[in-house]
Amino acid sequence: MSAAAGAGVLLQVESVSVRFGALMALSGVSVDVRAGEILAIIGPNGAGKTTLLNVISGFYHPSQGRIFFEGRDRTRLRPPDVAELGIARTFQNVALFKGMSVLDNIMTGRLLKMKGSFLLDALYLGPAMSQELANRAFVERIIDFLEIQAIRKAPAGRLPYGLQKRVELARALAAEPKLLLLDEPMAGMNVEEKEDMCRFILDVNGEFGTTIVLIEHDMGVVMDISDRVVVLDYGRKIADGTPDDVRTHPAVLDAYLGVTHD
Amino acid sequence: MTDPVLTLDAERDTFPKLVRANARARGQAIAIREKDYGIWQAYTWAQYFEQARLIALGLASLGLARGDKVAIVGDNRPQLYWAVMGAQALGGVPVPLYQDSVEKELAYIADHAEVRFAVVEDQEQVDKLLHVRAQCPRLETIVYDDPRGMRGYAEPFLLSLEELQRRGRAFGEDHPRHFDDEVAQGRADDLAVMCYTSGTTGAPKGTMLSHRNLLFTATNAARREGLGADDEVLAYLPMAWVGDHVFSYAQAIVTGFTVNCPESAATVLADLKEIGPTYFFAPPRIWESILTTVMIRVEDCAWPKRRMVHFFLDLAQDMERRRLSGRGVAPVQRLLYPLGRLLVYGPLRDNLGFRRIRVAYTAGEAIGPEIFVFFRSLGINVKQLYGMTESSGLIAIQRDGEVRLDSVGTPLPGVEIRISDEGEVLFRSPGVFRGYYKNPEATERTVRDGWVHTGDAGFIDGAGDLRIVDRAKDVSRLADGTMFAPKYLENKLKFSPYVKEAVCVGQDRPFVAALLNIDLAAVGNWAERRGITHTSYTDLSQKPEVYELVGREVARVNATLLDDEVLRGARIKRFLILHKELDPDDEEVTRTRKVRRGYIAQKYAGLIEALYGSGDHVEVEAKVTYEDGRVGMIRADVRIRDAEVVAAGSGR
């Protein structure tokens, strides 16, 4: 595969390996993420799913291999630089500012979009004010989109888990990402919350055209909403294809679904 | 019976004409607000008229003919009120539907009303209509306001409101006189709206109301209550309910006051506080839930504050009870009240959004006296009113300064009330509906010799006020002949913050028994403070501690019955707590939350038998319908308890 991205490929992960001491968390994994798709990463615990997400978002740097975003080599960027490029994420364990209101939490997602001087910001003058208003207006659209108007002013830490997950998604969306990484967005949710979250993910993808990479354990959800599925096992990619392809792939049945076949 | 309003001039005899008059006379005044993106967005009367005009022209471009029905489905949104006027302007008849209706209900009404167009809020409503489209052959076009999630829909009969208005604009350019001509053709006796009554029995009936019906009722009530253009209301009750149509549409247009649409159903209480309406309507269950919220917060306070709040609330309620029963207020109370206003009542009113309220109503069901007294004691002018869809919403309202606990007030101007020989309340007025759509038999049963038979048992008391006892058919007797009014008992039970819903049974039985629903918020909070863990509503409802708690509430109700000479025999001997909440989706209560007694008796026959048996528990399996219409089963083991009954004659 060449470094020049093929038409429509937003992110290219090329033969990436990550080593923690003696442990190979990822070995030689290659994944193409196409612009506008929803790609699910599945695999048993410890398969390297979160590691892959962390490599993409710059938390880890690969021991080997390269990462291209929009056709340019982005292998060694730090998280803030990655965010600046237009990649946002949510975390497996919710990482919100618990004492801050939902609104303020989401506003932090706009930080990279705010440019100003200390003095003007402190005095809330001129551009500082209009910028704040524009950002607030954008955040309000997201609040409306994710239907969290009723908890706008509530402290994030006091919300039920399912809503915290939604707020985290809102914060990620506030950065207007081109690529959204979701680490188990539906973990610990009940059926109704999962259905809501599925709808929001599909709507984000549909309305904003955001490319989405998500890790998910609920196979029903994965099969319903993803365009493509990548299967990892012990740090290796063992399958990559449409949900139907993957569902019937022998290596996947073996490794992940735990069904023997002969 | 002559009334100036009945002689309507031809320039002001329909709602579209009146909106046009408002747009001309006071075009820059705010007609309607909606909270959107966190901000109150305001529309003037000029904008209201123009938006509705474009919707009308858009509908005209689709071929809407006079008399065509237009379904309106969604939360209270300015766009949907405009659609109501848009349909009326062309001589169409808006049919507002309950936005939480399940597909079956929607299909029934859309088909029965022969709806040709539907203007709906969002994807949720579009999906429901798409599913039932096969059963509604006349439904041609669905217009949606919120484009969210609609990108994947390619059906040619789906149209965004924006597109409809764009087409309307183009149509208006080609037919510049069309709109004015159509509006000019409108007459006072044209149908203005068709409201389907939820009905506690049988299929919903389409109540036809004319412009004259509504103009008359809205204007007379506004005059009697002194409503003017400066008033503000919150439009948060379902548009399908005649009350919302009167308060948020008819009266708003007649008087020119401002209607405020909340951001979402979940933000109503916060929006209420921001708007601080001057004119407010809530059914008893909303008053109850506000009171419950207040009481939960008070219980969470540190004790000095809690003691202080309780002291002043008790003081105010005692004063209010004395006032309502015509006894004098003690001088020391008069002295303390201003202090209470400073420390408790004022801040509380402000916090609830009731600071500016001049007139507030409760109706639909009898309100628990304690709830009524609570709000009045804070200085909020809550009054009871009586009305029904068939009367264009209103029949009687309590007069300021003549508010009593057990009356529903005096008839509005132009309304005549009579009690039949059987004790049923009858009325006639220019607000009387034009009949049930395609159901002349039901119309004839209800309207006889011009008098509407309400089905309520009541009487006119010494002060000339109307009093409602119960639904005429619900008042019944125990096996030994003791009189028993189920709703009366249920209302008493429901005043407890822990009891959300109650159904009392006992006709031809040896004693009265009750099926109760706990209030999840209040009992959950109570359990939390005591470290009682629970996993679900069902689990919490069956905790022995919760039975203890609720048992005390039942005993309290039984104790108050001792004072009542007529009903003292009808005390509650056995009760159980239902393992699930009564839900309109399960057809156990109506969309306006009235208990459907017959259906419950049938559905829970096993439980009711067990109440009259000797066991202390019973196994049940109940069907639940989820919001999307799917059906699931809940299994539970429901406990049954004896209630504490103080023997008549003993005690006090």
Image: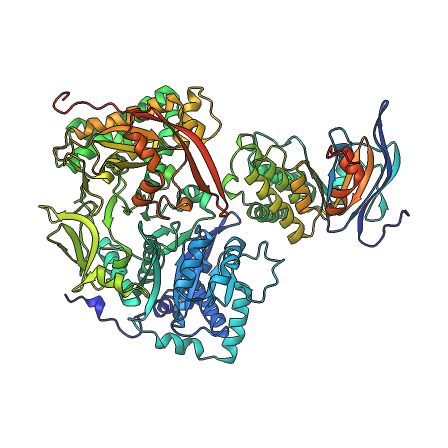
Tell whether B595 sits left or right of A162. Answer: left
Residue at the outermost right position: A2
Q: Residue at x 26, y 32 (%)?
A: B513
Q: Residue at x 40, y 37 (%)?
A: B581
Question: Which residue is more in the foreground, B169 or B146?
Answer: B146
Task: Give above or below for B62 relative to B615.
Answer: below
* Residue B613: x %, y % from top left: 29, 28
* Residue B630: x %, y % from top left: 50, 46
* Residue A68: x %, y % from top left: 84, 44
Q: Residue at x 78, y 32 (%)?
A: A48
Task: Give above or below for B621 relative to B190.
Answer: above
Tell whether B181 sits left or right of B448. Answer: right
Question: Which residue is more in the foreground, A57 or B632?
Answer: B632
Can you tell which quarter of the image residue B12 is in? bottom left
Residue at the outermost front position: A262
Residue at the outermost left position: B462
Tell whether B340 sits left or right of B582. Answer: left
Quick check: can you spot residue B584? yes
Question: Which residue is more in the foreground, A67 or A125?
Answer: A67
State the quadrant of the N terminus of chain B: bottom left
Count of all numbered marks drawn on residues in the image: 0
State the quadrant of the C terminus of chain B: top left
* Residue B305: x %, y % from top left: 36, 23
